Image: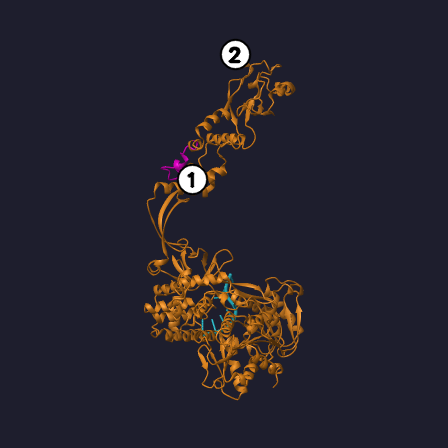
Chain colours: A orange, B cyan
Amino acid sequence: MSLPVDEIIPSFLTTLRNNPAVVLQAPPGAGKTTRIPLALLAAEWLAGRKIVMLEPRRLAATNAARWMASCLGEEVGRTVGYQIRFDRKIGATTRVEVVTEGILTRRLQHDPLLEGVGVVILDEFHERSLQADLALALCRDIQTGLRDDLKLVVMSATLDTEPVAALLGNAPVLACAGRSFPVDIRYGERDEGGESAEAAARTVHRALRETTGDLLIFLPGTREIRRCERLLEQSLPGSGSPLIVPLYGDLPFSAQERAILPADRRKVVLATNIAETSLTIEGVTVVIDSGWSRQLRFDPASGIERLVTARVSAASADQRAGRAGRLGPGTCYRLWTEHQQRSLLPATAPEILATDLAPLVLELAAWGISDPAQLPWLDPPPVSAMAEGGRLLQLLEALDEKGRLTPHGKEMATFPLHPRLAHLLLKARERNLGSPACDLAAILSERDILRRASPAGGREKSPSDLLDRCQLLAGWRAGNRHVGQVDVQSCQVVERVARQQRKLLNAEPPTGSFDAESVGLMLAWAFPDRIARQRAPGSDRYLLVNGKGARLSDRSAVHDEPLLVAVNCEGGDGGDGVIHLASALRMEVVQREFPSMLSRKRVVEWDDRQGRVIAVEEERFGALCLESRPVKPAPDEVQSAFVRGLLRKGGVSALPWTPAAREFQSRVMFLAREYDGEGWPDLSDDALRDSLPEWLERWLGGIKSMGDLARLDLLSPLRGLLDREQARRLDVEAPPDIIVPSGSRIRLHYPADGPPVLAVKLQELFGLAATPLVARGRVPVVLHLLSPAGRPIQVTRDLRNFWDVVYPEVKKELKGRYPKHPWPDDPWNAAPTRHTKKRLEGKR
DNA sequence: CTCTCCCT
């Protein structure tokens, strides 16, 4: 059978012979995965050296190897073999080795010269997995270093090939056509927003009318799949209706098979991204794409990942649409508009830009590199995520304080596990906890063995979600049939991983006995940055070591633990994160196991609730306070804590202001305005707040509570802000009051801006011609002239003019309204008074 | 109101 790629094979072989690297761009169905390695097998210039091909998935690796072997009429493991985790079919005569990503990385680390290998092929490179990017960087490093005879082939379906060709020293690019059928793309008429399940269900009805063949619906996650499934079951008639089948990674194998294999009637498959690349479904001619998928985001600040529902990229949408054109012409309904299509990102961000890079930092350190700029990258690993990865590796003792690989880190790098779990195993070995650690690490690294089906609630409380799972695994191993809570398939996978680790660690066979304390300890080794302290007794809110907040999920069996390890923690959108899996941790264990991370801190603080200064010495673990005991504070500590508390509470307005103190303040502020630049202190509230410790602290001796403070005379500290000369001038130039002609002493009011105000009954000023002056005679006061009842009559700064012009006008009306008071025709020569006529006469 | 997918 001939395939499209056959046409370019001769030119591919000569180009690769003459160049160190070639980029091959070919869409799915071109036949590159099987034809290229077989073609190289015949190339004499390879002189019998091996061909290693990288595949992103195990199934793809074994299928490719089996197909090539059958093309040669051989069994797998003779000329063509493969190696994936737990399965190796490679013999002495094998020349084509198909391997998955982790295998290639281990092999490169173990054999950095790639002895006996002539070509490395990176298949499906457009998927841009972290491991593939790393493999390319390391292979190119080998090629430009010690092995200039090594050939590299990058095969890609949709990637724009220029950047990778440039990275490989302007490698030639060969392209060939694919073999797929046209797909009719039908855009939606409006933006469906986030309601993808509803929109998808409606479109299923439409597609069932308009098309034939099976339907594949892409939805972001299980929640939407379940919702869409319910909607369709309610709206489709029972008999003759199509088969509705969900498909996602957490489903047991048998349920996945039901979705993939042909059915006896029309089929509607509701799937996640799993159907985009990993699984191919027989008989699909119609695709409905919601346009959304769940994507992982990594927050370098907290080292925590979170899943978001985001728009797919244009490349992803094309890949999804292509799923309808494998058998014959197909149809794809896109639940977004043609207009929105233009705003899609061209491609999904490569994994290296969006994930935890601690494993990458360890691989690079093992390769002998501390600065990633020493290697070629299509997208350099982000500096912040690399730094966070380095910090974590230091916590895990894999790197020393200078970022160099330690012997412990070197051993960690040999384990097929995340560095957290490799560290857990090595620490556990020292403590004779090897076998339980292997179980724990296996559970943490594989899919959850606990069945998710049961709704929230109904689960027993437990000190540890992980202790529960370890015990369930032990029960399954012992053949307990009542373990309906576990997924048998997941247990088998976990057991295989655990067995591999026991072998690597030289650990005892599993005993099945676990205790909460050692599970907590082991988890604290692996997740020292996820230790969390309960905010208050009984609360489900926690504070993590890194200072971030998190809330215990209802799905966790852990409840009301003062200290725990937040093993699976999902970052929140600014607010609290969610802890999905947790394990209790004993205080003494932290104190014993992490002495270098503990610190003591004396805290003297104002406590609002108790209304007094409290002093404690805290034992801290990062941002967490593990223990605090009361201490006796020094007087100066109390005072500064008090001031800080005051400032927090409400600034200077929280001080015990009296009218006299406020008046003093405003008088000084008046003079400071009048004599700007002559050294008067700024007594505004803002300035007082900023200098609170300096001017108030020494007056706080013996004050321990708000009650004590209320008895403080604020005038004294405020007076302390003036020097002797200023105090003298204040009394003269901004007097608190003025004696008016009637003999009354009247308060002057000093407003925040403008001149002072004298509010006085006008009769008390009879005979006075000149407006009173302050500030060495510079500033006339503002007179608020009042009626006998204290009502305002006139505001003026020109008293003479008032008597001459205004008084004659208003006198008549005042006389009518206040007949008992004197209203002389000649105010210049009348006696000033605050009394009525009668009293004046009586007095006389 | 739950966790997309893949790999040593």
Q: How many marks?
A: 2
Span of residues in magenta: A697-715
| Front position in the image: A527 or A117 | A117
User: Which x, y percent locates residue A75?
Assistant: 49, 87
Residue carrying label 1: A693
Eyeballing the image, is A346 above or below A677?
Answer: below
Q: Crowdedness of circle 2 by 10 Å Cα count: few (<14), some, many (20+)?
A: few
Residue A1 vs A408, above or below: the answer is below
Q: Residue furthest top?
A: A844
Residue A359 visible to an observer of this rendering: yes
Q: Position of residue A703 (x, y in %)?
A: 37, 38
Helix, strand or loop at label 1? It is helix
Among the 4 quarters of the image, the one containing residue A206: bottom right
Q: Is residue A375 positioned above or below A30 on the image?
A: above
Q: Which residue is mark 2?
A: A842
Q: Chain of mark 2?
A: A
Q: Position of residue A263 (x, y in %)?
A: 57, 79
Magenta-drawn stretch contains A710:
yes
